[in-house]
Image: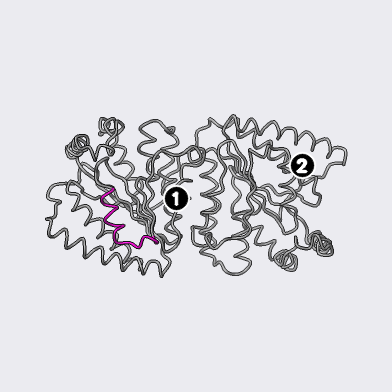
Amino acid sequence: MLKNRILAEKPSEEELKSRLKAAREKLAVQQMQIKEHKLPVLVLLEGWGTSGKGSTIGQVIRNIDPRFFKVASMEKMREEDGRKPFLWRYFAEIPEAGKFVFMDSGWMDEVTRHRLQGTMDDETYDMRIASIRRFERQLTDNGYLVMKFFLHISEKEQKKRINALSKDIDTKWRVNDTDKWQNKHYEKCFGIFDRYLDATDSPSVPWYVIDAVSKKWAELQVLEILTEGIDIAMQNRSVAVPILQNVFPLQKMPKLSEISLQNKTIGDEAYKEELKRLQDHLRDLHNRLYRKRIPVIIAYEGWDAAGKGGNIKRITEALDPRGYEVHPIASPEPKEKARHYLWRFFTRLPRTGHIAIFDRTWYGRVMVERLEGFCSENDWKRAYNEINEFEKELADWGAVIIKFWVHIDKETQLERFTLRQNTPEKQWKITEEDWRNREKWDVYENAIDEMIQKTSTTYAPWHILESVDKKYARIKALKIVIEELEKVL
């Protein structure tokens, strides 16, 4: 892309001034339009050291109300970032609907820097590229406008800027060792940048190479491309997104109606003995997990009153409280609803060596949101593949993913609902919504069958817990968790 670039010709000073004025005014108007249309806009600025990424962002944001944007400087990684999935810190920064986020460097800078330093092999590089392409496509599929700019300057221009900045006591701090190394190895960097830009250029999220030899000319190019992109995005808000075919290996799973719930019981004495033995074993494994820095994600879905809470409790009783967190997932908060539906789960992922337990999960997209009309048909049909991609990202990071469906029959649910209704200290567990959902048992069962069939991958399979006898389900869950942890350890 850099090799075959055809850069726009810089206009005269008079024309530059006139077009800048028009572009600035247009962006000032568009900020209200994107708020009205609830369009989230992510602007990524990458480029050579000293190419002016920061100053270009500074010029562009002068035309936007400060309440409508955020600038995120992503160049430096924190210790916390290194203990989360590759894309975690970028996903965490995505904008709310109707707002801008400007990123000063991002996932390109991180990947190319590791390649240049020789700390990333070819296999990891290819995985990173695949992750980035999925990440950017998912954002656009879910209504985001993603604009990617690469600020380009020549080797001679970069050296000139480094020398000028270094001579002034007030500006020499802006030149770092990376800038100097880049200039000294310009051709090597050029090749790595060029390969990356080609690999991550796509029709829906293209790269725009900006001639950054002049600050005002760079600003104008970014402004005109950005404002045009906003116009097109607002026009295309109602366009349906293609449903992609699943490319991940799936495990064959039975339908819920094919799963026998009979004779799945355990006696009280056997339960007590097994519970103690398994919890002791899990406690030992948790120490090894922490030492080996392995992240674990346990996801619980199931029928109302199936016994998820009690099941989770028997697992957490065996864990060091400093090394796990349980996330009860309810309806999304306004700030969560205003972002990609996976954002609230991505931001709750554990650090390496820790365990995150989700009581309800991202699968709400293809169950509650689907059946209650909280998202469009196109949204939930796309979600199967998006969820498989999300879990693949976690598996590639090294996480152990354990997914439970806690299963009971309709009669057992009615018994438990009635008991809750008639027991004062348990009445908080039953709501009108539970009774309404029960009336839709059959349509929920069809949706659950489809969910399990389409998202039980080899790297994140579903496990069915027969929970007519809650004690049996608890023991089975503990055994599965132990088995999965022993595999990775």
Residue 389 on image: x %, y %: 44, 50
Answer above or below: position of 324 versus 8. below
Residue 310 on image: x %, y %: 26, 50
Instruction: State the residue position of label 2.
Output: 220
Q: Amino acid at mark 2?
A: Leu
Q: Is residue 289 left or right of residue 196?
A: left
**What predominant SS class does the magenta segment belong to?**
helix
Give the residue drawn at x 57%, y 32%.
236
Residue 244 on image: x %, y %: 45, 43
Q: Crowding at label 1, few (<14), some or many (≥20) Cα neighbours within 10 Å?
A: many
Give the residue drawn at x 46%, y 39%.
333
Q: Secondary structure at mark 1?
A: helix
Answer above or below: position of 397 versus 405. below
Q: Is residue 284 left or right of residue 89?
A: left
As for residue 403 lying within the magenta part, the answer is: no
**What segment carries the magenta color?**
309-323
Instruction: State the residue position of label 1.
Output: 389
Give the residue drawn at x 20%, y 38%.
423
Give the residue drawn at x 25%, y 30%.
439
Instruction: Give the residue furthest to the front.
Output: 424
Place residue 306 in its image quadrant: top left
Disc 1 to disc 2, C-alpha distance: 37 Å
